[in-house]
Amino acid sequence: MNIHEYQAKRLLHSYGAPVAPGVAVYSVEQAEEWARKLPGPLYVVKSQIHAGGRGKGKFKELGDDAKGGVRLAHSVEEVVDNAREMLGNTLETKQTGPAGKQVNRLYIEDGADIDRELYLSILIDRATGRPAFVVSTEGGMDIEAVAEETPDKITTLPIDPVKGMTEADAKKLNRALKLTKQAAKDGLDLFPTLYKAFTEKDMSLLEVNPLIVMKDGRLRVLDAKVSFDGNALFRHPDIVELRDISEEDEKEIEASKHDLAYVALDGNIGCMVNGAGLAMATMDIIKLYGAEPANFLDVGGGASKEKVTAAFKIITADRNVKGILVNIFGGIMRCDVIAEGVVAAVKEVGLKVPLVVRLEGTNVDQGKAILNDSGLDIIAADDLDDAAKKIVAAVSEGKE
Ligand code: ADP
Ligand code: MG
């Protein structure tokens, strides 16, 4: 689960991390009211969407010359003008995909006098199985380019979860970030603070980009992106409260109600598969034959007919879907249950696109019989390769 920048900053501030004064607003009037309460003379108007790269993003409605999703303002009037331009419009960044995201909240923040922009994140390092800090002196809006072109400028420091973060660890980070004097003192406080927040709140990612050294030599968290481990949310009701479902994909919200492992993607072939590995392989083979999957979906092992029906409905509700591939290798999952679910769903919502079904395994004959007797227009496939070829061909025929 992701939260907005302003929520992340509030949370980190509650642990003692230095952040600027600021307030989240939903209207131009609020933007004006609150900007007047900030010290000035520099203000920053920041789009609150669940995606990074806002500074370099583009508002789709405003044309190429318009400024991005993070804007400096030198007076309350400029805050108001920017808020009016940004609210309600759609911001496209490297992380939103081509559809972009509508900006419904802004964060109005006190402007900082920046000396240096650094990068800092904490995540779970799969190689060591530990939380790790990733830091770089080259923070700011081009960290992806730094990672690609000069990876030696990035330092990774795994933390022993039993010992916790030590002063020696914090000093290593100070060295890697070339922090001295007051900034280094601030670092000795800040790094363990961030580590504490990360572990106590079961975060899967805590990214501060940029962490800044200000002209007065102090550190400040200038941007904050936090994701939480969904499996641990049950012990953090305070975090669940921060959820903004307007930022989430409607299909994914529906899928989560049915306990389905579903991820919406940009392609046009809907997939219903059992088992995460088989689902990944199915997506790969669709790509191999030149098409793109519309989703990842693992219906799981013991799915009921109702769950399969719900899954099929979510796939067909996606307007990008121009064909559906059902690929089931029945082990624990029974082919007849899948077939019943598919038939029930089609009866309810209809079937307007080609459907290829590959069934194998437990109760495969019953499954095939159910599909045959249903009178549905189904293209049967023998194996995964055959199934992928058939659905890609059917979808590209549909286009002509
Ligand atoms: P994003 O990463 O989504 O582009 P950031 O919050 O990192 O958004 O902002 C982009 C850039 O805007 C920062 O790298 C920084 O240079 C500038 N910036 C952001 N907040 C402030 C602030 N409070 N004061 C001064 N500059 C800021
Ligand atoms: Mg940033």
Image (cartoon, grey):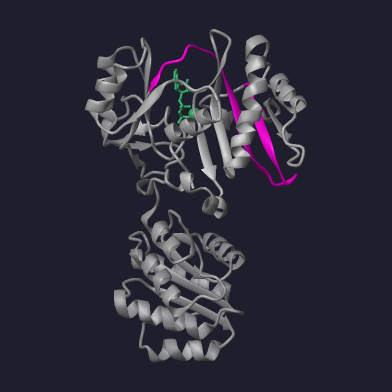
| Image position, residue 84 (x, y; %) | 24, 27
Q: Work out whether residue 276 can be spotted.
A: yes
| Image position, residue 275 (x, y; %) | 58, 69
Q: Image height check: is 252 above or below 368?
A: above
131 is within the stretch colored magenta: yes
- Between 2 and 69, the residue placed more toward the observer is 2
Tell whether 128 sits left or right of 351: right
- Quarter of the image for residue 180 reads top right
Tell whether 219 sits left or right of 82: right
Q: Which residues are magenta?
A: 109-137
- Quarter of the image for residue 355 reads bottom left
Q: Image height check: is 320 above or below 348?
A: above
Q: Work out whether residue 400 can be spotted.
A: no
Q: Image height check: is 91 above or below 118?
A: below
Q: Image height check: is 28 above or below 366?
A: above
- Between 107 and 374, the residue placed more toward the observer is 107
| Image position, residue 242 (x, y; %) | 42, 43
Kindly identify the residue that appears in the image at 60 percent across and 41 percent down.
200
Quarter containing the C terminus: bottom left
Please identify the residue farthest to the left as the structure is shown.
Answer: 29
378 is within the stretch colored magenta: no
Tell whether 177 sits left or right of 259: right
- Between 70 and 305, the residue placed more toward the observer is 305
Kindly identify the residue that appears in the image at 59 percent across and 68 percent down.
278
| Image position, residue 99 (x, y; %) | 36, 45
User: How many numbered discs sit on the rendered protein?
Assistant: 0
Kindly identify the residue that appears in the image at 54 percent across and 45 percent down.
228
- Magenta part, dominant SS: strand
Kindly identify the residue that appears in the image at 29 percent across and 30 percent down.
86
- Quarter of the image for residue 209 reads top right
Please identify the residue farthest to the top as the structure is shown.
Answer: 216
